[in-house]
Structures are given as C-alpha cells and as structure tokens.
Image (tube, rainbow, N blue to C red):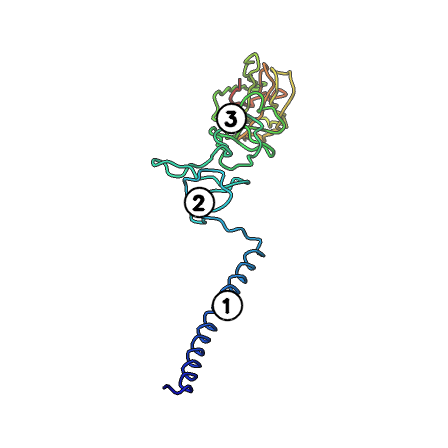
C-alpha cells in the first residue's frame, strides 16, 4: 500500500503547479485588458481624428489624408491636385500677371513691374507720356512735357549787310501753325572815320519795324574798329504764322559797315 503522505505531497505539488498556471494566465488576462483599456481611453479622449492616407485616385476636393509629399495645393477650402503636362511640366496661373499695354499719355506708374511700355516714354513728374518730337505745342509750353530737347541743327539762315544804313532781314511767315525758332544770331558793326555810337539791334516776332521785340543788343564801335556779338545755342520761339526779323533799330554812322545774321528752324 502506498503511504498516504506521498499522495498528499504529490497532490500539493500538482495543486501548486495548477495554482501557478492559474495565477500566470489570470495575470495576463488582467494586465492585457487593463493596457487595452488605457490605450482605448487615450484615443477616445484625443481631438485628433486619424484618417487613412489618400492617393491620387481619390480625385480633387480632398480635405483629409494628404501626405506632405503629395503634389496637392490648398485652394482655401480643400486640397486639389496640381495640374501639369508632360510638355511644360507644372501649369502656372498667369491670369493675375499684367502683360503688354497699349501706349498712351498720362500712364500711371504700374503696380506690377512686368508691364511693358514698348515705345519711348518720358516721366513728367506724375505720369508717363509718349516721347514727342519738338512741335508747335511743346515749343511754346511754359513747362515741356513728353519731349526731350536737343539743340537742333539750323535749317535756314538769313543775313543782310548795309553801309551807313539800317541792316535788317526777315524770315517770312510760314503760315498756319508754323513757328520760327531762332538758334543763333550774329550782329556786327565796323566804324571807319567816324565812331559808331551805341545802337540797338532787335530780334522781332514780326516783320521789320513791327512785332514784339523778343531780344535786344547794344553795340558801339570806336573809330577804325569793329565789334560783333555772336550768340548760339538759342531756342527763341516766335508766334504762329508770323515772320521773324533781326534788325538795327536805327541807322548807323557815316562810313560804318553793319551786318545781321539769323539762323533757325521752323516747327509745323
């Protein structure tokens, strides 16, 4: 017969093993649900909604699931795929970029620097104007606008010489809106046996002895001497349809030689 104490010992050992398995498996069952419950509580309490990543098959107007690497752009409400083609690559919207414009006067400074003024223009202090040639209008304006002045070449020259007289010469009226512009003047007086007292020489906007005097000189010469006044680089403008004259205002002394020369151009 078996000793009952061995049966008790074996039973106790088996019970201990069973109890150990029970504790082990029971602990797993206790720990695992506890961890799951904690993770679940964490997700449930978060305001972040996790979404699956979307690919291009989802199309436009996406509001979620977009990776930073994706070629999408935000339109202010949703994301849209970036457009492009194999020839030019990415399409760029240029509808907000100003292009060429039709030149006109009083053109304000552009707010977009890429606008093109394809003709010559000059700034008048406020706006841009097309560059103009020297004309009747800007030749008499108190402030020039739309034109760059250069000293023009003379297109005509008139001269007269008189001995003991009153030398005078006129550029006849061009009619219509034509204006004469004096660019250079030469006046000379030479005294022989008699001194030449002071005598005035006039540039007139009009014919001989008539019209407004627009410039004047005084000349005098001792016996057997000559005196000249030679001025260039002028731009003295006369009236429309009016002659321009250079003349001595009085007769010279006996045996005195005097001359006047006027050069200039005319504007239409």
Q: Are marks 1 and 2 in contact (CB under 8 Å)?
A: no
Of residues 121 and 267, which is closer to you in this image? 121
Lower sequence index among marks 3 and 1: 1
Residue pointed to by mark 3? 103
Q: In the shown orientation, is residue 124 left or right of residue 10?
A: right
How many numbered marks, from 0 up?
A: 3
Q: Quadrant of residue 229?
A: top right
Q: Which mark is residue 54?
A: 2
Q: Nearer the viewer, mark 1 or mark 2?
A: 1
Lower sequence index among marks 1 and 2: 1
The residue at 53%/51% (across/down) is 49
Q: Residues within 10 Å of mark 1 (few under 14, many from 20)?
A: few
Q: Residue furthest top?
A: 175
Q: Are marks 3 and 1 in contact (CB under 8 Å)?
A: no
User: Residue 262: percent from the left, percent from the top?
Assistant: 53, 23
Q: Quadrant of residue 258?
A: top right
Q: Residues within 10 Å of mark 2 (few under 14, many from 20)?
A: some
The residue at 40%/86% (across/down) is 6
Residue pointed to by mark 1? 31
Q: Residue furthest left?
A: 87
Where disc 1 sits, the SS reads helix
User: Residue 153: percent from the left, percent from the top?
Assistant: 47, 26
**Distance CA(mark 1)–CA(mark 2):** 36 Å
Which quarter of the rendering shows the N terminus?
bottom left
Of residues 99 and 116, which is closer to you in this image? 99
Q: Residues within 10 Å of mark 3 (few under 14, many from 20)?
A: some
């Amino acid at each position: 017969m078996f000793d009952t104490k061995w049966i008790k010992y074996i039973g106790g050992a088996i019970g201990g093993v069973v109890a150990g398995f029970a504790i082990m498996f029971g602990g797993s069952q206790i720990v695992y649900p506890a961890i799951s419950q904690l993770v679940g509580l964490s997700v449930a309490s978060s305001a972040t909604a996790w979404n699956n990543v979307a690919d291009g098959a989802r199309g436009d107007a996406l509001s979620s699931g977009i990776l930073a690497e994706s070629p999408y752009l935000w339109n202010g409400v949703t994301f849209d795929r970036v457009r492009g083609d194999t020839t030019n690559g990415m399409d760029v919207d240029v509808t907000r970029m100003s292009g060429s414009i039709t030149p006109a006067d009083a053109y304000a400074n552009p707010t977009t620097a890429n606008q093109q003024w394809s003709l010559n223009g000059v700034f008048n202090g406020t706006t841009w104007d097309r560059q103009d040639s020297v004309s009747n209008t800007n030749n008499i304006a108190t402030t020039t606008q739309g034109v760059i002045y250069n000293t023009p070449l003379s297109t005509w020259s008139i001269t007269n010489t008189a001995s003991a007289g009153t030398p005078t010469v006129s550029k006849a009226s061009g009619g219509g809106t034509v204006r004469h512009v004096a660019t250079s003047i030469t006046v000379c007086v030479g005294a022989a046996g008699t001194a030449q007292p002071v005598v005035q020489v006039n540039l007139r906007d009009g014919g001989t002895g008539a019209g407004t005097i627009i410039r004047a000189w005084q000349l005098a010469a001792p016996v057997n001497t000559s005196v000249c006044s030679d001025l260039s680089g002028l731009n003295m403008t006369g009236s429309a349809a009016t002659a321009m004259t250079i003349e001595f205002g009085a007769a010279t002394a006996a045996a005195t030689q005097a001359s006047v020369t006027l050069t200039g151009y005319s504007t239409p």
